Image (cartoon, grey):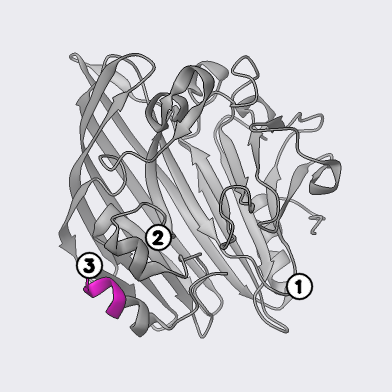
Amino acid sequence: MSWSGSLEELTEIISRYSKSTVLHDENCRVVICERGARVLGIFLDSSPNLLWVNPRLEDVFSKNDWNIGGLRLWISPERNFFYRRPESFEEWFCPEGIDPGEYKIAEVNLGKAVFEGRIQANDNLLGARLEAQVRREIKLLESRKGFMRLRIVDALVGDYPARVNPWALAQVPISEMSAGTVLVPVRRGAEPIHYFTEIPRDRLRVSSDHISFKIDGQYVSKLGIRPEDLRGPELGAIAYVSRIGKRMWSALMLRSHDIPSSQEDCLDVPKRDPNLPRAAIQSYNSGPESFPDIRFGEIELQLAPTINVSGRIVARVEYDLIAVIGGKSAVLTGVRKFLKIPKPRLY
């Protein structure tokens, strides 16, 4: 249920609608599209694309729709900008001013690409307008056989009467062989937030040091983790582990030191009940109710909110995207190293 072509086929399709660039070395290739400044492909060694890409990619491009896949930058609170009737969380839509926005490639070399552009959207809850300039830097920080790390730095300066959280979202594919698992390292006694509806027990496991969430594209649900439930205020992390071949597994991980440290800095309220606690880490599982013929998951970071500087909103946040492939044991070793989860529970 994900586009499964080669890197060359992916860049050829993109070229009909947008510019793109490829960061690369001997171990990996990273495809980045100017439209939306999205990372659309991660090819590690001889792996398939580790990011989800819409199987109807050309159709989505031609309609200028949002759901092409990959890793993207949005802003939250979602209620304010993505619902035409925000009081009741009705009539969801994606503002074109946020995604794809208006980005241009400003700088590129083998290991780094910089995008500059503008985002804009109406806040339908406050009756206000957001307009901001964005600089997005994507750097291939390191790689070796079976491993890659990207560093993403997003900077935003704009006009808006309140605050927003920069919001990093990576869409991940679901194997036809098995469900995938989202893992979030947490403190003992963590209480996950059921953002949309209550997540069934067979889709959510709370262990003493981590939370596991089932990703299969069969049930619309969203998990949230409070900043107070993370291991420490200085680091937030989330991983997606899945089987990508007969003997091949992969893990995609997002980590950041720029995570909200309290409820006051988490601006995205749950749809289920806006009075519930708010999350710094989130994960989404698609379902036929919303997407009848495609399946994907998401791992997400709500990043530190904008501050006011001389009457303007300002933010600079950075995070890493880490990819690991190999046998199941090797991939889980990578998860243990970066997430500090000794015994991750998988679906």
Q: Which residue is mark 1?
A: 329
Q: Is residue 335 above or below residue 103?
A: below
Q: Position of residue 273 (x, y in %)?
A: 64, 20
Q: Which residue is mark 2?
A: 68
Return the residue nearer the eye: 294 or 335.
294
Q: Mark 3: which amino acid?
A: Tyr
Q: Position of residue 235 (x, y in %)?
A: 56, 38
- Tell me what residue is drawn at x 48 percent, y 22 percent: 267
Q: Is residue 262 left or right of residue 133?
A: right
- Tell me what residue is drawn at x 40 percent, y 84 percent: 26
Mark 3 vs mark 1: in front: 3
**Could you classify mark 1 by the number of other residues whose Cα lies within 10 Å: few (under 14), some (14-19), or many (20 or more)?**
few
CA distance for labels 2 and 1: 32 Å
Q: Position of residue 99 (x, y in %)?
A: 31, 46
Query: Can residue 140 be seen by looking at this rendering?
Result: no
Mark drawn on residue 17: 3
- Tell me what residue is drawn at x 24 percent, y 68 percent: 20
Q: Mark 1: which amino acid?
A: Ser
Return the residue nearer the eye: 109 or 34.
34
CA distance for labels 3 and 1: 40 Å
